[in-house]
Amino acid sequence: MRRYPPIADHGLVGDLQTAALVSSDGTVDWLCAPRFDSPSVFASLLDHDRGGHFAVAADTQRPPVQLYLQDTAILVTRFLGETGVGEVIDFMPVEHPERPAARHRLVRILRATRGQVHFSLECRPRFDYGRAGHRTDVGEDAVRFDAPGAQAFLQTAGPIRWSREGDDVRSELTLSEGEFAAVQLTVGAADDAPLPPLTEADVRTLFKGTRDFWHAWVRHSRYRGRWQDMVNRSAITLKLLTYAPTGAPVAAPTMGLPEQIGGTRNWDYRYTWVRDGSLSVGALLGLGHLEEAHAFSRWLGDRVRAGRTVSGEPLQIMYRIDGEPDLQEEVLDHLEGYQGSAPVRVGNGAAGQLQLDIYGEAALALAQGVEDAGQVPPYEGWKALSGVLDWLVKAWDRPDEGIWETRGGQKDFTYSRVMCWTAFDRGIRMAREFARPADTAEWGAARDNIMGQVMERGWSTERRAFVQEYGDTTLDASLLLMPSVGFISPKDPRWLSTIEAMEQELVSDSLVHRYDPAASPDGLRGSEGTFSLCSFLYVDALAQAGQLGPARYAFDKMLTYANHAGLFAEEIGPTGDQLGNFPQAFTHLALIRAALSLDHQMDAAR
């Protein structure tokens, strides 16, 4: 077992309430239960010695190979040797995902497909981010781990026998061609309800049910474009990162993975960002996954109606997956961090920031939802949204922390103003289309004032480009969304000039930086890689501008940075390694948006 495998050297499995990362050498080194944002059971990705893991290894000579079964979230890790070939098949059964479950199952099937393969298994749980001890009871074909408020069970089918090592367990077995063994790990809250024995027939039934679930879900997609495999994989990844009981997607299933190895930009992303979720609505609707898009719209509408935030504003930038607003940030000093990248943070202090752009993304998502449903917005929901827009009339011209959650003070960010314009524009459209009561005169005046202000103060005559903040000359890739929301024509001379300026400063071989921290200090130490979200937004902007050759090149080039399983982290470092929390929903939704846009423009041109 490697001490710290590369971040991208993992596949993801999940059951739509939590998820696990499995390294390409067969180790589960990240799993939280019973929810994405629960304390960890395995976290060796953040501390090899203290975090805990569940490893399956084989004595084969060649490096393992990992892949997904086509159009599923079933992960196969294959061990290749001269005397035999073995494989581990990992999946989490999806059963009644709409109901919160206290217990969750990870199934690991061991097989020899040729010759003989010797497997070794090692299970070392470390509950509550490695802070809680546990008691271990070992039976003939089952193991029980008990910790304060949490449990884990191992059940086996086939010739797996556990031996105890302190409070952990291990097993050794040899399988010949065609032989089969399986282990089911059940994790979650403490519960004394007995588990039925595990049989080989049970395992086969669980496998078939999981495979059939994903095949049926993918068949709902109406995408038939040029990049179907990658789009399907991104859609499956977004589905895996969505907490089914509420419809809220997490930004990533992990926390603390660094944007720079050894750096301090290590955040907890296991929460729902209004921005990320709202932008996913358009991508999901474009694919035909209507149920998921409408579920998030309902979750978002509930947040607008509730108005419960830690900052006192109508909305806050992120929430827990159940909609709770408290995300108090703390440092886990006992964890060394990925390759020593400390501090490791749990919770997210940025939840209290003022980021005015979220009102535009929220209005955009709600407008897309009601437009797709073809129904008049519910009266109570409309009252709540119109109340937010009435508040925004007086609040839009305030400095804020901006989309990138900088910790260098509030500023007059151009992107925030553009999205406030979007909020009023979509609100006016909905009010007129559905004849809803609204102060459209006030909203219209605010919208027009923002347009004039951005064109005057957000435009730099020196740079011939729209810039990050008023009175500055720093460029910002978030502005690549300006034509997508209708603020400016994608072929407007000002916009084409802005793209050209970004290409000179932010784009490196089709990869795009968010901004230059040296030119615009963000209050954080260290540097970062190119931002994969922005690279796909760049493709979308080029496609809309009619620059189809460069757009397709940039898109195809970006796809080469996906990992072996088609997954993307948040960033790509100078050496081409993936950095940051993994996999990141924002990146995958942007991939889908770029593919839809590029396909549409290429078809239109043809």
Image (tube, rainbow, N blue to C red):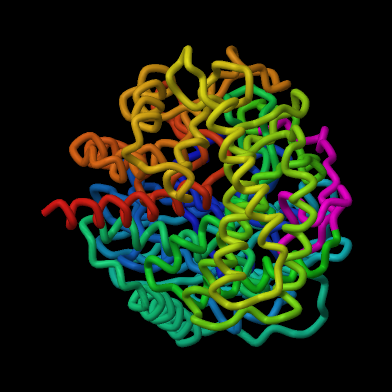
Residue drawn at (61%, 28%), measured in percent from left and top? Answer: 339
Q: Main secondary structure of the magenta part?
A: loop
Residue 68 higher or lower than 383, as above or below: above
Query: Does 599 lie within the magenta span?
Result: no
Q: Is residue 421 visible?
A: yes
Q: Picture coordinates of residue 53 (x, y %)?
A: 63, 50
Instruction: Tell which of 568 and 385 is nearer to you.
Output: 385
Q: Quadrant of the C terminus?
A: bottom left
| Front residue of this view, candidates 19 and 203 | 19
Q: Is residue 252 visible?
A: no
- Asked whether residue 329 is drawn in magenta, I would say yes
Report whether 368 appears left or right of 129: left
* Total number of numbered discs in the rendering: 0
**Residue 284's quadrant in the figure?**
bottom left
- Who's the residue at 63% across and 33% down the image? 338
Q: Nearer the viewer, residue 300 or 12?
A: 300
Please say if 424 is above or below 502. Answer: below
**Magenta-highlighted residues:** 309-337
Q: Which residue is found at the position 82% from the left and 68% from the top? A: 306
